[in-house]
Each structure stands twice: as structure tokens, then as C-alpha cells.
Image: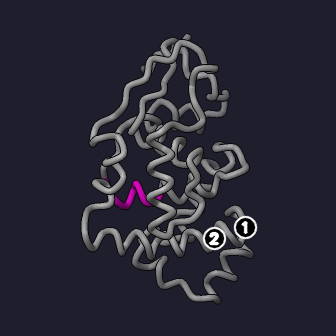
Amino acid sequence: MTKRCFWVSDDPLYIDYHDKEWGIPVYEDQKLFEMLCLEGAQAGLSWITVLKKRAHYRKVFDDFDATQIAKYTDKKREKLLSDAGIIRNKLKVNAFIVNAQNYLRIKESMPFSDYLWQFVDGKPIINHWSDRSQVPANTPESDAMSKQLKKDGFKFVGSTICYAFMQACGMVNDHTSDCDFR
């Protein structure tokens, strides 16, 4: 029987996400932007909630094309807030728009990947946790990322959200030592 990290349920969507995405380094700007938005959408909820809605998020948020999102009107925002296929939280929907604007501003001076990966010196941090109690909710690196993102105007980017983002995008490898995907 395949062993996976403690947080993976028996939901096939969750298993597929763990096995094929979580912890694999991502360097593509648009994918990083998407994951940062979705991790922010998760705030206060479980990741599986967002994961089940991810395809619909991609559809209604123009495949996370920041150029499009940055130009969303009040009418588009209201349409999104009435869409049961996403988490209908005004602050989170607004954050996607604000974050798209800030993402585009950052990209004027450097790749977004470089901007984010600087917090781990450009390479994944490989942790060797033997037990889930060892896995932190945040680290000095996620604290620094959160602080810089907030300084640059991003929303829903607290340190815990940033650490979850870093795990998801492979900036840190937090598969526990008993996970077959380590």
C-alpha cells in the first residue's frame, strides 16, 4: 500500500494533487500567481474545498490571466460574488484583483518566479520531518515572504498562507519521511 503524507484523505482528487503536484518546484510565473491566489482563497478553510473548486476558479478567473483579472470591473466582481462555484467572499475576490495588479507591477522589473524564489535562495528547502507534529505552520522564510508581499500591496498573504504556498509550489519539501513520494 502506498504511504502518503498525513493530510491526504482518500479523495481521488486529493491523492492526485499530492502525488503529482504538491511539493514539486514551480517556476512558471502564471502558475505561481494562480497558486498564491488559491492559497489565499483557502484562508480559514481546508485545501480540499479549494481544490474541488479549482477548475471553476480557472474558468471564471480567465485561467488566472493577471492582465485580465487586473481590469475586472465592479460588474464582473458582483458576478463572481454570486457564483456558487467559488468561495464567495468579497475580501478574497477583491484580493485576486489587487494581487493581479501587484503581480503585473512586479513583473515589470523581474520575473515573478525570481521575486518569490528569493526567499529560499532560489532552491527548494528539503526538510526531513519524521512526524507531522514537526511540520511548522510558518518559518522565517514564510515570514519574510509575507512581509514583502504585504509591503508590495498583496492581500491574503499571511505567513501561514505563504508557508502553505511554499509547500505547494515546492519551495519547501515537507513530505514526511514515511511518505512514498519523498
Q: Quadrant of residue 87?
A: bottom right
Q: Which span is picked out in magenta?
A: 28-34
| Secondary structure mainly formed by the magenta segment | helix
| Marks 1 and 2 in Cβ contact (< 8 Å) | yes
Q: Residue at x 48, y 44 (%)?
A: 142
Query: In the drawing, does residue 126 fall left or right of residue 11?
Result: left
What residue did someone put label 1 on?
89
**Crowdedness near tag 2: few (<14), some (14–19) or many (≥20) residues, C-alpha within 10 Å:** many
> Which type of secondary structure does the marked residue at label 2 adopt?
helix
Query: In the drawing, does residue 118 fall left or right of residue 39?
Result: left
Q: In which quarter of the image is the N terminus?
A: top right
**Distance from Cα at disc 1 to Cα at disc 2:** 6 Å
What residue did someone put label 2 on?
93
Q: Nearer the viewer, residue 113 or 53?
A: 113
Q: Which amino acid does label 2 sit on?
A: Val
Residue 26 screen position, x and y as percent: 35, 45
> Which type of secondary structure does the marked residue at label 1 adopt?
loop
